[in-house]
């Protein structure tokens, strides 16, 4: 066993050595890292194949269910309007996600300053979360003149709560002994925040980011549906609406595909950021094989 | 540093005229709900002593130690460290360090950063701090692991890091709350021996909390025996055995005699308790 061989080496090399050896010895297809990509790809390919086969065999008309081939063809053919719409939706998603992250972190810092502030304000954060954005969006669109700003605010409201909830929990999740140690050494409030609270909160914060990145996209699409703005500032939701009116179902599918891929992309990006920040120390990011 | 003359650091039997490092003056701890964690304690610990607080869980030994450190306020009475209330210790040349039962390290920071923490908090310039960190890590034999993360180290090594962090401020008084309680026996013996070396080399005063009779006899110049419900000091024992103490001491007849004395004292305390209840 490779672990037996490494017990005599120093701890730092022992930590790295088994992974390196495994990679060298185990066939490519049995490596967990390769499997993580291959297995979902196999499932996806099979599903697409079944889809294509069903559409072809049952001769389903494209205005009911287009084949995956037709969907891809439409995506390439209509790339100019769809790509532009994707950019608009992406812009709103990113703006709102950044806005929600900044606001969420600031609100969490406020919450952990005193239990009283949190007790007084937390119910309103919940209220914000449980009120359906579809119901509030028309109001915001009336109040905020600029449609892009209005949609950004809507999407940010959807994405805000997980960041507040997770970061607050994280800022409170401190090893009590470590906190006593800081107090014993007369650490200032600022030192405790920077050296103890923020690092302790990072795993929770990144958990919040992963949830919120998806919510920001959902919020952006919902806001576009409600706003219904056309013209040059139209996003993917508008493309879906238009395609629906024109019974251009392949285009609808192509737009849907773009939204899903964007969501997956955001999630992967957040997972990667999280690994970058926590990979070396936090249990959630250590390989479990 | 105001170092005391070496002759005052002699074994505790000769310490009647020495400077008291810690004075506990009728300090007691009663919680607002009426729980008596610790009945009034009077205790003087001279500079250079290695004192162990020994007793079962709930006897208030950690409470007493935390009161000395200033982490807990006594509900009555006073505690002085070098003749000063512990809260005023920061403008005094003497320093104390506290070592917890668990290593209490920052999991995201390297060994070096962890050990440097008290210096960083005190605003010591980076260059000087790094030099002292290297020195402290050499003392505990971990200088090769400066850049490792805590999770890459064994429990015993993590505890050494914690001790290095305690020593890096060059304290005069080291307070240790069951520091090796979670370690296996072999590792514990090793760390006990290393701690004695450090104590002698650095001329420290140590207050050490444990519930192991053998550890208390092996380490201490004086053992404070405590009992539970309510927490109180019952007896004191001087372990009149020269240092350095070798593993041979642990299998010697004197060692067994001391251990038996402490065992009997512990038994007397618990029977007296049962009689008073019955």
Image (cartoon, coloured by chain):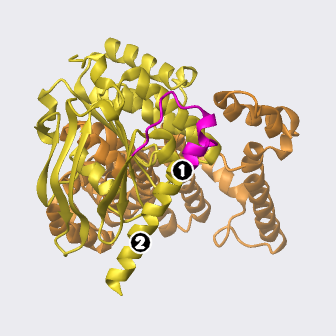
Chain colours: A orange, B yellow
Q: For the point 24% across and 20% down, which residue is it? A: B4
Q: Label 1's element? A: helix
Is residue B92 located in the magenta-colored stretch of the structure? no
Q: Which percent across, then down, holds residue A212?
A: 41, 56
Could you tell which of marks 2 and 1 lies nearer the N-terminus? 1
Taking depth in this image into account, of B224 and B70 the one nearest to the observer is B224
The residue at 55%/62% (across/down) is A252
Classify mark 2: helix, strand or loop: helix
Which residue lies under the disc numbered 1? Answer: B257
Task: Mark 2 and mark 1 in contact? Answer it, CB < 8 Å.
Answer: no
Q: Is residue A177 left or right of residue B216?
A: left
**In this rendering, does residue A209 appear at all?**
yes
Callout 2 environment at 10 Å: few (<14), some (14 to 19), or many (20+)? Answer: some
Q: Which residue is mark 2?
A: B270
Q: Position of residue A235 (x, y in %)?
A: 41, 53
Q: Position of residue A103 (x, y in %)?
A: 25, 50
In the image, is residue B160 above or below residue B184?
above
Residue B4 horizontal side relative to residue B202, left or right: left
State the residue in front, B84 or B233: B233
Q: Is residue A260 above or below residue A13?
A: below
* Residue B147 place in picture, x, y as percent: 52, 24
- Which of the numbered marks, if any, corresponds to residue B187? none
- Whether residue A280 is visible to the viewer of this picture, yes or no, is no
The residue stretch that appears in magenta: B238-257
């Amino acid at each position: 066993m490779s672990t037996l061989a490494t017990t005599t080496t120093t701890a730092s090399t022992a930590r790295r050595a088994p992974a390196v050896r495994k990679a060298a010895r185990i066939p490519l297809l049995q490596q967990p890292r390769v499997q993580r990509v291959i297995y979902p790809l196999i499932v996806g390919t099979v599903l697409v194949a079944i889809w294509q086969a069903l559409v072809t065999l049952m001769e389903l008309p494209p205005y009911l269910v287009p084949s995956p081939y037709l969907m891809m063809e439409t995506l390439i053919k209509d790339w100019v309007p769809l790509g532009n719409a994707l950019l608009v939706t992406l812009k709103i998603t990113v703006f709102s996600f950044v806005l929600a992250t900044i606001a969420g972190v600031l609100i969490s810092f406020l919450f952990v300053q005193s239990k009283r502030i949190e007790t007084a304000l937390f119910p309103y954060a919940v209220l914000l979360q449980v009120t359906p954005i579809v119901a509030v969006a028309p109001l915001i669109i009336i109040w905020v003149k600029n449609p892009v700003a209005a949609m950004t605010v809507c999407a940010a409201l959807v994405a805000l709560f997980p960041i507040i909830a997770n970061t607050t929990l994280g800022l409170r999740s401190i090893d009590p002994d470590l906190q006593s140690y800081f107090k014993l050494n007369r650490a200032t409030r600022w030192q405790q925040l920077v050296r103890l609270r923020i690092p302790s909160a990072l795993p929770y914060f990144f958990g919040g980011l992963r949830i919120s990145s998806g919510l920001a996209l959902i919020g952006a699409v919902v806001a576009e549906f409600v706003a219904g703005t056309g013209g040059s500032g139209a996003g993917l939701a508008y493309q879906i609406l238009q395609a629906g009116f024109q019974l251009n179902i392949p285009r609808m599918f192509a737009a849907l595909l773009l939204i899903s891929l964007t969501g997956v992309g955001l999630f992967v990006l957040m997972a990667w950021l999280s690994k970058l920040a926590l990979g070396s120390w936090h249990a959630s990011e250590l390989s479990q094989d | 540093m105001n170092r005391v003359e070496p002759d005052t650091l002699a074994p505790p039997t000769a310490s009647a005229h020495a400077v008291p490092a810690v004075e506990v003056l009728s300090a007691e701890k009663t919680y607002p709900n009426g729980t008596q964690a610790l009945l009034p304690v009077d205790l003087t610990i001279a500079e250079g002593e290695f004192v162990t607080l020994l007793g079962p869980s709930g006897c208030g030994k950690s409470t007493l130690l935390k009161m000395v450190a200033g982490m807990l306020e006594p509900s009555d009475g006073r505690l002085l460290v070098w003749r000063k209330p512990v809260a005023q210790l920061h403008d005094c040349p003497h320093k104390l360090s506290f070592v917890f039962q668990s290593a209490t390290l920052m999991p995201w920071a390297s060994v070096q950063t962890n050990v440097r923490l008290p210096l960083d908090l005190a605003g010591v310039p980076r260059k000087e701090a790094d030099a002292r960190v290297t020195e402290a890590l050499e003392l505990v034999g971990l200088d090769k692991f400066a850049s490792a993360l805590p999770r890459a180290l064994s429990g015993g090594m993590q505890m050494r890091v914690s001790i290095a962090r305690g020593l890096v401020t060059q304290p005069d008084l080291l307070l240790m709350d069951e520091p090796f309680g979670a370690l296996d026996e072999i590792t514990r013996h090793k760390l006990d021996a290393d701690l004695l070396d450090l104590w002698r080399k650095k001329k420290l005063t140590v207050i050490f909390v444990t519930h192991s009779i053998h550890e208390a006899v092996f380490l201490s110049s004086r053992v404070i025996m405590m009992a539970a419900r309510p927490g109180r000091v019952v007896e004191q024992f001087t372990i009149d055995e020269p240092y350095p103490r070798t593993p041979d001491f642990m299998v010697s007849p004197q060692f067994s005699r001391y251990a038996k004395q402490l065992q009997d004292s512990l038994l007397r305390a618990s029977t007296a308790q049962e009689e008073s209840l019955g």
